[in-house]
Image (spheres, rainbow, N blue to C red):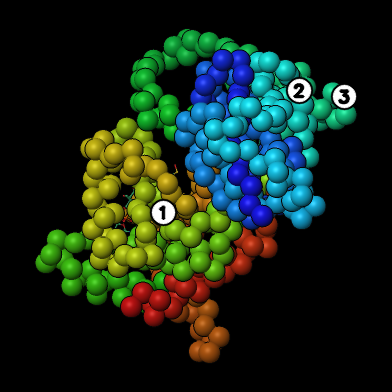
Amino acid sequence: MNYDIFLPDLGEGIESAEVSEISVSVGDLIEKDTTILVLESDKASMEIPADVSGEIKEIAIKKGQEVKTGDLLIKVELKQSEMEVEVSSQPKKQETKETEAPEINIEKKQKQETPNGGVFASPGVRRLSRELEINLKNIRPTGKKGRITKEDLHSFIKNKINQAVTTTGKGKKPRQKIDFSQWGPIEQKPLSKIQKIAGGRLQNAWTEIPHVTQFNTADITDLNEFRKKLKKQNEPAGIKITFLPFLLKAAVLLLKKHPQFNSSLDHAEENIVLKNYYHIGVAVDTNQGLVVPVIRDVDRKSIVELSKELESISKKARNKKLSAKELNGASFTISSLGGIGGEYFTPIVNPPEVAIMGISKSRWKPVFDISSNDFKPRFVLPYSISYDHRVIDGADGSRFVKDFSLILEDINNFQ
Ligand code: CAO
């Protein structure tokens, strides 16, 4: 038998409130007094408990919706044992105010703890934890019957702030001012806005993420030949084909095989969010500092399309014309210094991503060929991958670079 749960009188003169959380889903088996939703009004935060036990059949409201007394909230199929009791007492919508309303936890009115997901806390504590995205399960309760008190939440927040201050170093004493001119002539140049923003992010990433960097080489002799051909073909159209579009395509093949490199840790650091999209950030060197625009859906674009897009976003980055959308949402980043020089570097992970690839300049090298028992000139690309060791193990890192070289060494992957 179905039973409709309507919004009871909220008391306190509150006529309506906004649904801030729906704590159940269709198909859930609930017990009487289980919190089914949380409402927020300008006066209070309220948890609405179920007044029956059974299975949720339909949810008639949406998060963010304004609801008022008597509105239908949820349809429940009653548990067999409850049917007889409830058949006669099912309230009609208009009768709701007269029927005995379930006890609602109103923060302002009666700071009482409620069981929910095994955690006991008052609505006020729940509301603050929701606003700050703190998982109450991470807090050690000190209240009666294992209740998380306001003080528990406050000391958890204080600890987190202290940890952040210690790890970011922001709490350390100010740097000593040094007069460098005492040793010779100097010039002072202010950091650009981009350098300041990027610097803060890099500092945090470096101190918060346990980095590991793995190095490897790939023999790109065949790929180099293939690229040269494609470059010539596209020159008349003014399209510049560099190595980077091939590396972007190769990265997608690799990320599909090693999805943990295309992921993020969730805010509570309890889950890994694997992404089924391939938006790749590309570090661009500008005279204002490092900028990382994002090429979306690299898996759906051809080498020529990627070449065009690369040229357009790096131009935009250098002319400070990138929109916020073009700078957000990367699932992996490639930083290429291959057009400049140097052999290997250790890129810093760009959070919330968990891995970044660093490409260095390829060189011709004598490589020993066992079949001819001689050295052969091969075009060799050095590269590195830095990753967050909380999410990725060293063995995964090693498999990742091995597979990246195999992909680059087979030009069939790009035809
Ligand atoms: N090996 C050998 N040659 C390479 C190469 C590599 N790995 N990568 C690029 N090249 C070549 C290109 O093919 C091109 O030569 P041709 O004209 O003969 O084809 C030349 O070097 C210049 O390439 P490019 O740098 O203009 O183009 P790109 O597509 O390789 O890179 C971009 C584009 C925007 C990534 C690059 O210009 C750039 O800004 N790189 C710096 C990124 C950076 O600062 N990273 C550091 C972050 S950590 O602080």
Q: CA distance from mark 3 to mark 1?
A: 50 Å
Image mark for residue 144: 3
Looking at the rendered image, the quarter that the N terminus falls into is bottom right
Left or right: residue 223 compared with residue 241: right
**Dot 3 beta carbon under 8 Å from ligand 1:** no
Residue type at the position of mark 2 = Gln
Q: Is mark 2 within 8 Å of ligand 1?
A: no
Q: Position of residue 214 (x, y in %)?
A: 59, 57
Regarding ligand 1, which quadrant of the image does it lie in? bottom left
In the displayed structure, does residue 311 sit left or right of residue 75? left
Give the CA distance from mark 2 to mark 3: 11 Å
What residue did someone put label 1 on? 280
Name the amino acid, label 1. Answer: Ile
N-term mark: 2 or 3? 2
**The C terminus lies in quadrant:** bottom left
Q: Earlier in the sequence, mark 3 or mark 1?
A: 3
Q: Is residue 260 above or below residue 121?
A: below
Cβ–Cβ under 8 Å for marks 3 and 1: no
Seen at 75% across and 41% down, the residue is 32
Say which residue appears at 58% left-offset and 38% top-offset.
92
Residue 52: where, in percent of width, then height? Answer: 72, 43
Estimate how packed mark 2 is, as few (under 14), some (14 to 19) or many (20 or more) residues with alpha carbons within 10 Å: some
Q: Nearer the viewer, residue 172 or 12?
A: 12
> Which element carries disc 3, helix, strand or loop?
helix
